[in-house]
Image (cartoon, grey):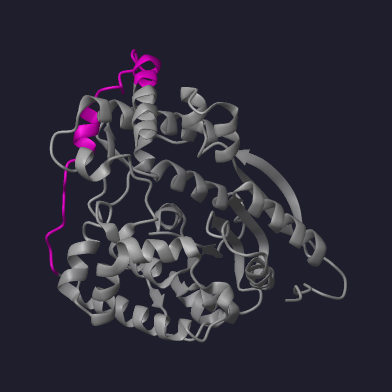
Amino acid sequence: MIAARLNMWTFAAHGARRFRFDPRFNLQNVSDGFASHIDESNNDSELLERICNAYITAVDHQRSASKAYAATEWWQQVRRRSLGPVIRALQSRDICALRKMYRNFYRDACSAGLLGVPFGMSSAYFGGAISNLHRRFYLSHALYRIDYWRAQTGNRFELQDLAGPEIGNPFGVCIDGTLVTVGADYAHCCAKQVGTLLHSERTRVAEIGGGFGGMAYYLLRDRAKLTYCDFDLPETIALSSYYLMKAFPRSSFILYGEQRLTKDSIDRADVVLMPAFELANMPAGCIDVTFSSHAMSDISCKAMGEYLNNIVRMTNSAFLYIGNRRASKTISDLIADAYDSFQLVETRSSGWHSHRVSGAGVGGAAGRDAATMFEQCYMRVVVPQHEWAPLAH
């Protein structure tokens, strides 16, 4: 706690010096960004019932699914520590309790593990007036990320492009009337990277580990004629179902247990939200681009092989992966050894997790190295006689 507090103070002081002549460095931008705006409407009972039905069915079927798709030890700890109330509400179909949590999910424990929240969040940021130290810390962090987002996207977008829906009572920093919510810059950047790999008029994108739906929101908002499929753990899929169905009420959704996954049913839908074990039932060649950010970083090598079998089988064009050094090397080695049909065409380090550290000079080279992530792009190539060779388990 002492070390965390010292690092926060150091970074806040650094940011105050770094941005002291920047008009965006106005502490009121943090206060405005953390103001509460909860949706008090109760017109989503049918939607929440649908989510509960899909969740209960997924949990029941998870027991007989391959262990490759089971929750990691880290996620099991998150469940035990933070997700008890939302799990009980989903299982008992307690619509009132579920609505209360979901409409405030940015600030509620039901989103634990999915949102990057500031140090001391509950007491320092959501308990009334925010101290200047905490405001300087958060604003410095936000401005570094916004500037990094601009650099990564070649200054092609305006700040307003980061605006999102007010679903879940989001928080962030409010600059020139635009609320930049926590993680919005990274999610938008990922959506644009995925977009560069889509070339046909009607496209299908799969994401493994889509969180609450941040990247999916920008992808669906900015690209027409796209089918988006997400595969994740049941609790996460339940939350992303709420977020995306509220954000796109006119879109067609398939939740788990509602329809059998075929090429036709996938093409007719705008959004398909499934537990991870449904990857094994995806039709061959039904996806153009598969994307995953961090979700596969902590799984075993054996589980990684099963995931890759499904990715290679269902993906026609490209696989974009972002993760830590260990997982990136495991994936590249497995693909090089077992799959002639996919080729690594680009690898680069990602500064999204280390940029704040390097910018502030806190942590030094060791801190930057530990936080460095890698972005890898694999493309399908034409091979004779066979499409793919599954890994032996």
Residue visible at 80% across and 67% down in the picture: 338
Most distant residue in the front direction? 2
Judge by depth and name the residue closer to the eye, 71 or 22.
Answer: 71
Which image quarter holds the N terminus? Answer: top left
Residue 144 spot, x, y in % from top left: 43, 29
Quick check: is 252 in the magenta stretch?
no
Give the left or right position of residue 38, taking residue 392 as reference. Answer: left
Task: Find residue 387 and report its horizontal and vertical position in percent.
Answer: 78, 73
* Residue 195 in view: yes
Looking at the picture, tell me which residue is in the foreground, 15 or 264.
15
Q: Residue at x 84, y 67 (%)?
A: 383
Q: Position of residue 111 (x, y in %)?
A: 32, 58
Q: Quadrant of residue 163?
A: top left
Depth check, front residue: 365 or 324: 365
For the question of whether residue 249 can be seen, the reply is no
Q: Which residues are magenta?
A: 13-42
Vertical side of 80 occupied by 364: above or below: above
Is 33 drawn above or below residue 49 in the view shown?
Answer: above
Question: How many dots with numbers?
Answer: 0
Q: Main secondary structure of the magenta part?
A: loop
Q: Is residue 176 left or right of residue 189?
A: left
Residue 180 placement (x, y as % from top left) = 32, 39
| Residue drawn 60% across the image and 35% down it | 369
